[in-house]
Amino acid sequence: MKVGIIGCGAIANIIVTSVVPEKNGIDIAYFFDKDIERAENLASFADGVAVLDFDDMLDDVDLILECAAPVSVREYAPRVLEKGIDMIIMSIGALMDTKFYGEMEKLAKEHGAKIHLPSGAIVGLDGIKAVAKFGLKEVSLVTRKSPKSLGKDIDTEEVLFEGKASEAVKEFPLNINVAATISIACQRDIDVKIIVDPNVDRNVHEITAKGDFGEFKTTTMNYPCATNPKTSMLAALSAIRLLKSFNETISVGM
């Protein structure tokens, strides 16, 4: 499987340095970033090609992995899907726009492409998907991050946001993809609270789901990426796991 990457920052670096040395049938071959130096650095490590023009890699890949930002999903996803190329989207918040979501779903179906959304920086997504249409009545997310992760300079705990996921991803497009992931998984605009807390050094995500099936709660306490505190290390690891699953004969979970 030949892969091209959009965005060559912290997440892409973790994925590439983990996947490339294993030589497990995944060939990360093309790299695109508006900062060409970042693309060239990763391409050099992977013995791949850094492209100045995004379209230059579309005729020679099986899958595109987006590791950039929601604006990049809007700009490049239509061009990928129109070519019938599968896509992994890390900036899932872009798909909280229901009109855009519908357009991308239609494009993918028309051209025989698949859109893959990794579980990202949370656990418990399989459970949420399982009960989404079987009596699920309430889903909420409380996210707690350090001031550094949220670009704040404060020394006391503060609630930065309380509302729906669709609004959270607009206000924090680079910080709260988890809210979008859960919302899309359970097909509803979930309740979200975002807290900046100077007493934590990890990104904490608490999910509560209630319904006819009972109730479950998960807490994920992720260390942020060393090079980008806005991103949890687990987000990159989930993409690595997804990539590797494409070549597995036996699949565990959804």
Image: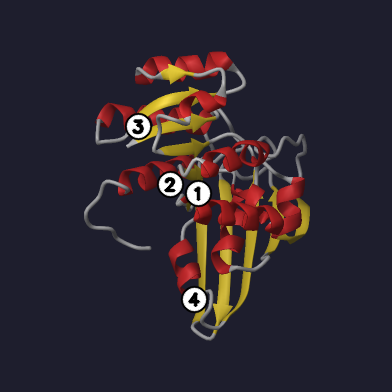
Looking at the image, residue 201 lies above or below residue 127: above
Q: Earlier in the sequence, mark 3 or mark 1?
A: 3
Horizontal and vertical percent for residue 159?
77, 53
Identify the image quadrant of residue 174: top right
The Cα–Cα distance between marks 1 and 2, rounded to whole angstroms, is 5 Å
- Please rate how many residues cluster around mark 3, counting C-alpha atoms within 10 Å: few if below 14, some from 14 to 19, many from 20: few
- The residue that label 1 is drawn on is 120
Amino acid bearing label 4 = Val
Amino acid bearing label 1 = Gly
Amino acid bearing label 2 = Ser
Please give left or right for residue 28 compared with residue 32 in the image: left
Q: Secondary structure at mark 4?
A: helix
Horizontal and vertical percent for residue 86?
45, 45
Looking at the image, residue 35 lies above or below residue 135: above
Checking the image for residue 195, the label placed there is none
Q: Secondary structure at mark 3?
A: helix
The Cα–Cα distance between marks 4 and 2, rounded to whole angstroms, is 21 Å
Checking the image for residue 238, the label placed there is 2
Depth check, front residue: 222 or 78? 78
Depth check, front residue: 118 or 193? 118
Point out the residue furthest to the left here: 249
Q: Earlier in the sequence, mark 4 or mark 3?
A: 3
Q: Earlier in the sequence, mark 1 or mark 4?
A: 1
Identify the image quadrant of residue 206: bottom right
Point out the residue furthest to the bottom here: 212
